[in-house]
Amino acid sequence: MTKHIPVSSEPYATYTSKYQAPYASRGNFNRTWLHLDTPNEPEEEFTIISYNILADYLAFKNRHLYSYCPNSVLTWANRGRKILKEIQAYKADIYCLQECEKRHFHCDFAPALRRLGYRYVYKQRTGEDMWDGCAVLYNTKRFELVKHCTVEYNSDDFMDRNNVGIIVVLRDLKTNRKLCVANTHILFNTKRGILKIAQLQKLLLSAYEIISSQPMPLVICGDFNSTPHSLVYRYINDGVVDLSSMDEIFMSGQVEPFVPLHAQPKRAYNAETIHAFNATQARFPEDDSVNRCILKHPYKFHSGYEHPMPSEEFTTLHDDAKLICDYIFFGGLTEQLRDSLLCTRQLSLPKIIDCTIPGIPAKDVPSDHLPLALAFSWTS
């Protein structure tokens, strides 16, 4: 059974209880901390938040997505201040942020969060006209940085996009255990499902190079631009997908087929793209698939949010989308490593039916995405 723990209705207040969150009930979202059933009272909890904060230049580059939002609300002078207050109020141990515009991150966020004891790794997107990137921040009172690497998805003619990722290894100062955390923002293009999977595979391979020799659990956060139970989602969650099982345009779940996929005639799709993938992309040593349309990874993952009714909830809401596309997965190369992390609490997702505003950002909701928040404890 899941216990619902209400949060304060006062936005941006000072929060002391570990069961409170600053999001409150703005926009009638009624987000609450869900206290998950655990065998014992959790000890030495730590919290992880994943949050696409909507880069300023992208907000105005894609202004058509926010017809309901006046410029006075959309401007960074308004949103940036509220996002920073929100981040400060959560008091999380680890933040994985996407769409952090470099100048705003280094001028507005980093100094304020450094004063609170946070340190960070930042990676800007590749390409001259890409001003945003990803950031991982960690609380130095709880974690220390052991190593880190950044990941670029533009290594060849097939993998040719400007998206990036960050991988950090952190040591928990309270338990001396190590944790690997990956943060990424996957390609948006709704037609390029195989390329999305390829980006995720490169991220997982980069993490594998670190943790295969020193086993530890892995947490993956980010905006995957894919819906729950889509083929892209299933690649992470299930560890195996058939790249020829459906047309690439439907793999992310962002585009609905005119005919249900299960009712479509059986055929092999994407032959040219799969050939390009196999000609350029590395695979895991454990991937022994004879059929090169089958793609595997060796990790055992759980999603921090189960999404039993994904069409009823959302993490992003604007004129072009009302869906879930943000995730936190946790796991490892073995079930034992995955189970060494116990998810004890999650910040609930709002129901679409309960939403009383046309979209976000809004007056009291500063991004077009909602933050995901999970609490973990170590098992013995």
Image: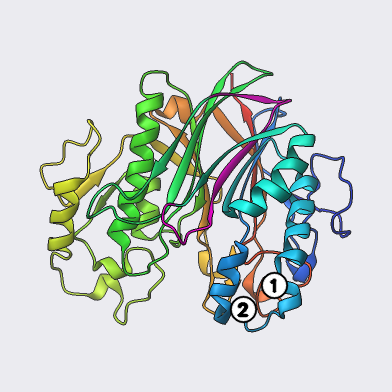
Could you say which quadrant of the image residue 370 lies in? bottom right
Q: Is residue 1 left or right of residue 111?
A: left
Q: In this view, does 299 lie to the left or right of 263?
A: right
Residue position marked by numbered label 2 in the rendering: 66
Three-letter code, disc 1: Leu
Residue position marked by numbered label 1 in the rendering: 74
| Residue under the image location 86 percent in, 45 percent down | 15
Residue 82: assigned label: none
Query: Which residue is outermost to the front?
Result: 128
Cβ–Cβ under 8 Å for marks 1 and 2: yes
Q: Is mark 2 on a helix, strand or loop?
A: helix
Quadrant containing the C terminus is top right
Q: Is mark 1 on a helix, strand or loop?
A: helix
Q: Does the magenta stretch include residue 198?
A: no
Q: How crowded is mark 1: few (under 14 residues within 10 Å), some or many (20 or more)?
A: many
| Residue under the image location 85 percent in, 55 percent down | 12
Q: Residues within 10 Å of mark 2 (few under 14, many from 20)?
A: many
| Spatial CA span between label 1 and label 2 | 9 Å
| Residue under the image location 25 percent in, 35 percent down | 284
Q: Where is residue 292 in the image (x, y as percent from the top left)?
A: 13, 48
Q: Nearer the viewer, residue 284 or 280?
A: 280
Q: Which of 104 and 351 is in front in this view?
A: 104
Q: Is residue 129 magenta?
A: yes
Residue 325 shows in this picture: yes
Q: What stretch is highlighted in magenta?
A: 126-146
